[in-house]
Amino acid sequence: MTVRERPSAAENARLQEQGRKVLTALYVTLRALKLYPLENAAVQSALNDLHQLVSALVATDGGVELRVMGDFFFLNETRLRLDLSNYSTFGSFARALNNHGLGAVEVLPGIERGEWAPFLSLLLRPPAEADPFEGFMQRLSGAPILHLQFRPETEVQEPGLEEEEAMHAAKRTYAQSVRLAKEALTDVRMGRAVNARRVKRAVQGIVDQVLANEPSMMTMTTLRDFDEYTFTHCVNVCIFSVIIGQRLGLTKLQLYELGLGALFHDLGKSRLDYEVINKAGGLNDEEWFQLQQHPTEGLLALFHLHGFQEMPYRQMLVVYEHHMKRDLSGYPKNRRPRSPALFSRIVSVADSFDAGTSIRSYQYEPWAPDQVLREMRDNSKRGLDPLLVKALINATGVFPIGTLCILDSMEMGVVSAVSKDPKKLHLPVVKIISDAMGVPLAEPRTVDLSRLDPATGKPAVAIIKTIDPQKYGIKVSDYLI
Amino acid sequence: MTEIPRDSKEGPTGAALDWSDPSTLPVAEVRELFVALGKALRAQQLYDQNNPVYQRFLTQLADALRGLWRSMDSLQVGVEEDRLSWMGEEIYRSSSRNDSLAFLLYKDGLREFTIHQGLEDAELPSFLRVLNRARDLRPEGDDLLTLLWEADLQHFTYNYVDLLAEGLELPSAGDGFPGGFQLVLERETGPEGEDGDEEEESGESGEAGAHPGQVSAEDFNPTLYSLDPLEMERIQADIEVEMERDLRGDVLAALFDRVEEPRFPNRQKEILDIFALLLPSFLSRGALSSAGAILEELTRLLRAEGALRPEHRVQAERILDEVSSAEALRELIQALEDGTIAPDPAELSALLRHLRAGALAPLLRGAEEAEDRGIKSIIQEAVRGIAQKYREALIGCMDSTDPVVVAGACSLAGRIQFVEAGPKVAALFNHPEPRVRLAAVEAALGLRASTAVGALQDALEDEDRDVRIAAARALGALRYRPSAPYFRAIIEGKALRQADISERIAFFESYGLLQDPDALRLLDGFLNGRGFLGKRESGDMRACAALGLGKMNTPEAREALARAQGESDPVVRSAVNRALRGEG
């Protein structure tokens, strides 16, 4: 594989455009080959277009590599942005590659037009049953293809920031955001003006970080501090909201608007009785009634924020509606017709997930993340939008990062990454932290549960149970951050 | 410092120059570029986007960039407080902070930027806009970095110092579990299954399933977490709904819901304060429907029994009074007139409908002065509505020192047939301003009240021609026969002969309408009679008399007209024929 440097911003824009064109051309050609014989004019025209496009790209860039990793395509080192205008095209070609266990296709200088048809025709054939990648390579050996190289999906690594660099940036963004959330909430409690500019910058940082390296930001949400819950929760909800928004194809500016609303979602609590908000144990009816006022108080608090060119109406609605539930059975109750909009519903989902997995003053034993997801998904009384819950699970996997689990080997581990393969979201990467006897490992080792045992064709190890780490006071973040 | 600027002496990538020899560097061209940038920035401030002057400076800047790209791929510039540098060479300096590009960038933390090839193609106007907006930012508002982020320029990258990140510490979790993993494994996988705690938890969270933590293969079905194309379509539709949402309307609806809760008096007060804050903002932005919605809600709250505490009622009344004040409405009308606000007629009408008595005077003036017929008509309608609700205020307007307001109020009193205004209207026949007296005449016609009608007779001899004509027409229209002697005197007098033809026609026709028993004799005499030496009246006077006879429209009057049908004077003949045809 050719090692390439990370592209500049301008280069990135060019590659985004070229990448979309190449994927569209591949998709169009694949579809034409599926429908018509090779000599058909539509097929020939599609092949011409594809060849011209890729040849030009190879000429300027010295070679082209297309990698598919989960939901994402990379053209050389550039992650192509998935949005609602291209998700179907991208998804279709990704599935075609994944069926054959292909993770990357590299186009070398000298590629000839005649090489495309055999390659794409091979993609259209049913995959080999035992080992799809091996089967594909065997069939390929008989085809006149000299300038296309392939790698299995198991070998494909996510390019971009080095992991350490990404984590460093994520830590900085997270810490900064928590501090600003704390400042903002404290300012509201003290009746001081909130510095909206700093809050905006924090949200911009979160959006940037999620766009650049989503897993690193998701990992940061495992850093839960009971004492700082109010503030880390605001930041976590912001992060999860932006992650969901990204899955839905929101633009960068839309993610920013969403993130801003999410960060402020509990602002109203700063205007309520501190004793009630932080009361240990259950709340009585009057206290519960008080707590239910926080969306309204948050809405009103946002009117006093300075530093916005226009009133932050969208954020006000997010703050006001995030406990309303889809059927409006939540709070506050409405006297006029209202339908909580998408951003409010996204924040509801993010809020439910983070709140459900956190220790709070009135929740000593939170659920394990996978149980929270299941509850969110299956219990319609929660009033969450099922599609948005799906989008969240799509991002977090069935076992979100930070899930403490017991494997069938009786080892204990912490989920450290989500599988890149959308079909294997239940098979994450796990850091083993103790052996089968419960002896902590001096050096935790990482196991990808999606790897198959060659002998059985099934995953070598599997999760049998998840545990709430906070129930035992285990700091999963120690193993991840 | 979170973003560490790279060494700006590094040679740009892909450069075609001999970077090892500083004497060959195009320093002069780079300096020229920043001169061109300064000019383009100023031009953007001064001119519209389509203005040729701005376009010329924009082209010059783009050309300067294209010129640079012949020798380099990107331009990496270091930023200091008073200067910009490239490859160690100063390329821009300004000692004055006010208009310094270097300081503009420096003060918000930018320490280095790179212009990439391509900025000149599509992003240049946005780039200039960001810089110009950054000049005008308020200290508590956005900064350059926020603006640059929002602009999301693909061909302008930057590094900055971030003071927010200084001394940051990650929040830390609490103490770790002292029991060791062995105990965890024993508890979670022991032969008895879940321990007491787990059972308790299971009981609490029964909705989650009977065996929390136990992995279920059912969860692994990809359809549970993959969005299919139809679901993505629904999401797309939801995004569109979100983006097109009536944000203001929905926020207002939330406030309206909450302000109706008397059990939260402090909140009610706060929301009323917010309404007072929002109203001028909405009006200045032309968000008339939102402003109207607030007024409607306040009006409704004031009507609802017990909805507001007494002190909040006062607050709500004050808001309505303030928005109905002369100052507020003067602003609104001015904005409507100069086009700052382009209102939807229905929205404007809905807004004005909720105004109170105080709005009458300014709106009366506005209705009079508005040039746009549509706006004029909407204001008139609104004024009518307010006047019907606040009749006393309408009478009050007739005492205004502003003759436009007095005249408007007077006319309106007539149009809405506010009979109680009769004495006031009658008094206005003596107003020094002719336009007021004219309005009083119109009002008297509308009111048909004896006090006002009586005053009309005096107005027949008003010093103002228009008032006289209007009074004559009004009395004619009212068929007010008691005024016949006044008409006779005027028609037979000398003054009318010196008046213009319109005034004469008005008097003759109105007199004809009165059906005065003496009218036939008088008018026939004017038309067909001869003087002492057989001399006839002037053609104009005879024509006027013919029109008067036409208005009488009796057989005798028609007979008199028929006798003049063969008249040689074309003016008279024409008037006779018109009168016989019932025209005029």
Image (spheres, rainbow, N blue to C red):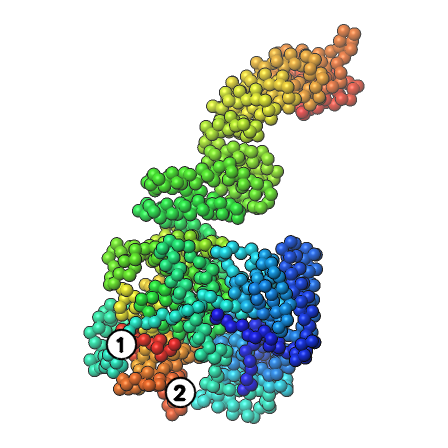
For disc 1, the marked residue is B177
User: x%, y% of residue B377?
Assistant: 56, 37
Q: Chain of mark 2?
A: A
Whether residue A465 is visible, yes or no, is yes
> Residue visible at 57% across and 66% down?
B80
Q: Chain of mark 1?
A: B
Whether residue B218 is visible, yes or no, is no
Amino acid type at circle 2 is Leu
> Residue visible at 32% across and 55% down?
A272
Q: Mark 1: which secondary structure?
A: loop
Examine the rendered structure and indicate whether residue B157 appears above or below residue A140: above
Viewer-nearest residue: B24 or A36: B24
Viewer-nearest residue: A138 or A254: A254
Name the side, left or right, on which B262 lies relative to A125.
left
Q: Residue furthest front?
A: B95
User: x%, y% of residue A462?
Assistant: 34, 83
Residues under labels 2 and 1: Cα distance? 34 Å
The residue carrying pointer 1 sits among few (fewer than 14), some (14 to 19) or many (20 or more) residues within 10 Å by Cα, namely some
Name the side, left or right, on which A218 lies relative to A10.
left
Amino acid type at circle 1 is Phe
Q: Which mark is residue A452?
A: 2
Name the side, left or right, on which A35 lies relative to A286.
right
